[in-house]
Every structure is written in structure tokens, then in C-alpha cells.
Amino acid sequence: MKKSLIGLALACAALGASADAPRVRLFASAGYGFGGDPLMEGTWVDGNGQQTGTWDLKAGKGTALALGADLRVTDRFSLQASMGYQRESVDGAGSNFAFSRVPVELLGFYSLTDRLRLGLGVRKTQSAKIQGGGTYDYINEPYEASGGAVIEGQYLFGTPSRTERAPMFGMYLRFVNETYKARRTAWDAKERSGDHLAFGLLFYY
């Protein structure tokens, strides 16, 4: 599944660069996710050793970017393949932790109207890991993600042209279902939920 999704994403991206407009469109998105179980938790302390608050690093949280291609199969249905990057970090005095991952997705979208689309699909996250910085720069812990599912709604700010290629902007709201498990159980023996909601902006060309 992993290799087939990556291959499909790359094939669609290449097709998008060469196919006649507007059957295939290049796609990009930028957004933010909320949710998931904490992978790490801790407390902040001041210079006097007093606790000033708590922090956590959640499996579904973070800035999310994606690039790919959208193939219009019929007037109402299209396939979209993408490869993304999501990262969340927490920073303290002299140290920081970050959870990064590379999701690969394949979604099918149905256009309810010219501007409103509903999509369902699958997702496989690659290269998930927690990295430390500063005092904890020796930490580099990989995680394995389960196969995931995605449901996404999109609203386009204009009506897409079917006769010429033109920039198109929009917004999205999505729910992602997936889980993570540390590859080294000595680090983290529990399976963690990466389920999250995300919203952001879209760009098609």
C-alpha cells in the first residue's frame, strides 16, 4: 500500500505538469491540525525551579502542507493524490521537541455544487519521528503509522473553469483517522491516536 500510494502521487504530479488544462490541475494546501493523543508531556519551570505550566506534543497537531495533482474523471468526480509534511513543536529554555511526519494521500472528490466538494480517501504517513533539540538533541525516536482514512470538505472561492487553466483558491475542513506506535517499545509502548481535525487554504492551477 505504501509504495503504491507514493507511486500514484508522483505519477499524478507528473501528469499534472504535462496534461491539457483543465482536466488535470496542480494542487497545494496549507493548514493546521488539532487533536490526537499526547506523545510527550511535561512541565515548564522558571529559573527558581517553580512550575509555570504544562506542555504536550500531540500526534495529530501541527502545521500541515501538501502538494499534488487533481485529476477530473467526470464532470462531478475527481481523484486527488498528494504528498505532505506536518510538524508540531514545543520550545522551552534551552530545549525543544518536534514531531514531524510525511503523509501520502489518495482521495476521491464529488462536486455537490460547482464550489462545494466532498472527499473520502486513504492515507499512509511516512517518516514519523520525534526529535529533540538543545539539551535533548540526542533524541531521535521513529514512529510507525497505521493506514489511515480521510474525509474532507472543500469550498472554492470561485467557479472552476473547464475550458482554460486558471488559479483557483478555496478552503478545506477535514478529519483524519490514524494511529501511531513507537518502533522502540522501550521509548513508548502504547499505541497513540493521531485522529485530528484540520482546516486550511487550498490552491489549484
Image: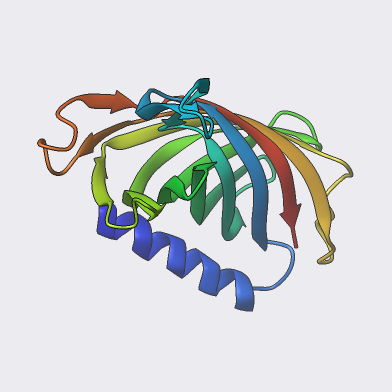
Q: Position of residue 197 (x, y in %)?
A: 56, 26
Residue at 50% in and 54% down: 84
Which residue: 27% across, 60% down?
Answer: 3
Viewer can see residue 1: no
**Nearer the observer, 89 or 37:** 89
How has the structure been colored for display?
rainbow
Q: Nearer the viewer, residue 21 or 98?
A: 98
| Direction from residue 142 to residue 53 in the image, left or right | right
| Position above or below: 201 against 42 | below
The image shows residue 97, relative to residue 110, as above or below, that is: below
- Inspect this view and state whether residue 5 appears: yes
- Residue depicted at x 59% and y 38%: 109
The quadrant the C terminus occupies is bottom right
User: In the displayed image of the protein, which residue is found farthest to the front?
Assistant: 48
In the displayed structure, 159 sits above or below 194; it is below
Residue 4, given in percent of the width and then of the height, sits at 30, 58
How many callouts does the rendering have? 0
Question: Picture coordinates of residue 92 (x, y %)?
Answer: 52, 41
**Hey, which quadrant is residue 181 in on the image?**
top left
75 lies left or right of 63:
right
Residue 91's x, y, as percent?
Answer: 53, 43
Say which quarter of the image contains residue 117.
top right
Front-lying residue, 171 or 96: 96
Which residue is drawn at the image coordinates 29% and 37% (left, top)? Answer: 147
- Quick one: which residue is furthest to the right in this view? 158
